Amino acid sequence: MVLLNSTTFILIGVAYFGCMIITLIVVLSIMSRKDRKKYSLEISELERDKNLIISANILTELNKVEPLINNDEMKRIYGSWQERFQQIKEIDIPKITDDLILIEDLFDRKDYRELKKQIADTEMKIYYLKTKSNFLLEEIREITLSEERNRETITKLKANYRTIISKYNNNKGAYSLITQSIELQFENVDKLFGAFELSMDKNAYQEVPKIVRAIDDIIGNLKMIIDEAPLIINMGQKLIPKKIEEVGNTANKLISEGYNLDYLKLEYNIGETKKKITDIFARLNVLNIEDSTFECKTMVDYFDSILTDFDKERGAKKVFEELSRTILVKTTKLANVNNQLLKKIDDIKYSYDLEDEDLSILEVIRDELLEIREQYDVIIEEHRSKKSSFSHLSKAMELLNLKLIKTEDKLDIALRTLGSLKDDELRARDQLDEIKDILNQAKKLMRGYKLPVIPKKYFIELSEATEAITNMIKELEKIPINIKILNTRVDTARDLTLKVFATTKETIKTAKMAEATIVYGNRYRPINKDVNFGLVKAETSFYKGNFKNALENAINAINIVEPGVHKRLIDEYQNE
């Protein structure tokens, strides 16, 4: 292994450092070339933009203006343009040139930091000067192109004008109210067209745009007049007066029939309408129709709505008259019914156990009916004095009728409640007879079949039913009767009696079936001791009154010698 001495290490380090220096120089050189290329391109663009500021278009347009100068104003304007052009050409452009020279010098010296600032500043100056130059060019073109542009505009305006005149002449009678004003305006338009031609001949390009605008405004207004004036005149002279007459005649007829129309303020509104029509025609005479069509249509709509209101008044009168009759009749009828009930309050309290609050509803109904009658009289008096419209009166009657319906519902509930008391009492007495009859049938059935022993259950249920019937009778004999308690007593007595009846039928049915089964099984006693033993047990239970147990023992005994009889006998028992 060869060992490197210190000299060798130093040489290697120097070599490495040298490589780093060379690499750095190469990188900086590349970056410098890239920056120079970028700045060189920007300087070239600035030079090109400077050269485009003074274009041939300005000189061309100035040359077009020169033959058009035939007055002092045009001469002054042309001189101003010349001065501004010379300012750009001889002062502003050289300043930009000096800035570009300075930029070239900075570029050559590689003073990129200062170069960057100078380029940005020069860009702004070029942009400002370019805008100044373009603005000058546009001003010049306003003159050089004005003839073509104005001629085109005037041609269109003349076409529109001819259409307007044609429409006017074809329907001249529709404009009779403003014929003089329209034809005078036609003369003004003709004069303006003449003034336009004269100004164009004199190259008075400052006046031409004003004339064109004036012609455009007048023709636009004339078009509106020609389009809308016939409708305005027709509505103002015929339609609206006809509506006024129709409304007036209808109103007079209704008033004579007893209608109150004061709330419509017809006299005032008709007067205001006539004033408005006069104003519209006054403005129309000077060819001012701003909002006139809208105002006329609004007036027509107003009178149409008044005629609709008249129809509503007629309908309201019918409603009012109908409700006037029905409310009076119904109020009187309900008051009579309620008063009859109030007279019987003492009897009702004597017959039935009721609290005062159960009967207080009748006094509430009486007070409500009195209040309804008072309000009814006020409305009728208001009608007789003709102080209110039928629409107002009918609405008041409708509200009163709603109150009456609610009171009627209360009275119906009270009638059903009080009426049900007597119904419940009568129903209870009828059911008492039915319950007694059912209990007697149960006793008769039990006595009719000679049972060896009557089950204890029957006597218990019979005792309960008898006691319930006794309680029911006691409740019916009370004065006053408490209907709630009575209904409970009725339900209890009925349920217990039906229970006794069911027990009686079930006991007799079981006893019959048990006895018949034992008799049927007697044929097997001599041939099978188990059958005999089972039947003996069945007989013992039967004579003790345990009929269900006797039936089961008898069936089980017979089933020993006659398999399947068990199911047949059970089915017969259940279907008995």
Image: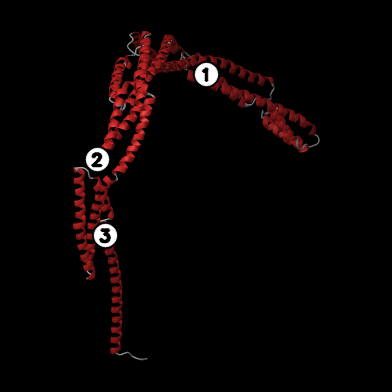
Looking at the image, is 438 positioned above or below residue 127?
A: above
Say which label, 1 or 3, has the lower sequence index. 3
1 or 2: mark nearer the eye:
2
Q: Are marks 3 and 2 in contact (CB under 8 Å)?
A: no
The residue where tag 1 is placed is 471
In the structure shown, which secondary structural element does the residue marked by tag 3 occupy? helix
The residue where tag 3 is placed is 51
Residue 202 is labelled as 2
73 with respect to 305 (left or right) = left
Q: CA distance from mark 3 to mark 2?
A: 37 Å
In the structure shown, which secondary structural element does the residue marked by tag 2 occupy? loop
| Badge 1 density bin: few <14, some 14–19, many ≥20, Cα 10 Å | some
Q: Amino acid at mark 1?
A: Asn
Task: Give residue 142's position: percent from left, percent from top.
Answer: 27, 45
Residue 318 is labelled as none
Foreground of the two, 34 or 94: 94
Say if residue 453 shows up in the picture.
Answer: no
Task: Give residue 9's position: percent from left, percent from top.
Answer: 30, 86
Quarter of the image that includes the C terminus:
top right
437 with respect to 285 (left or right) = right
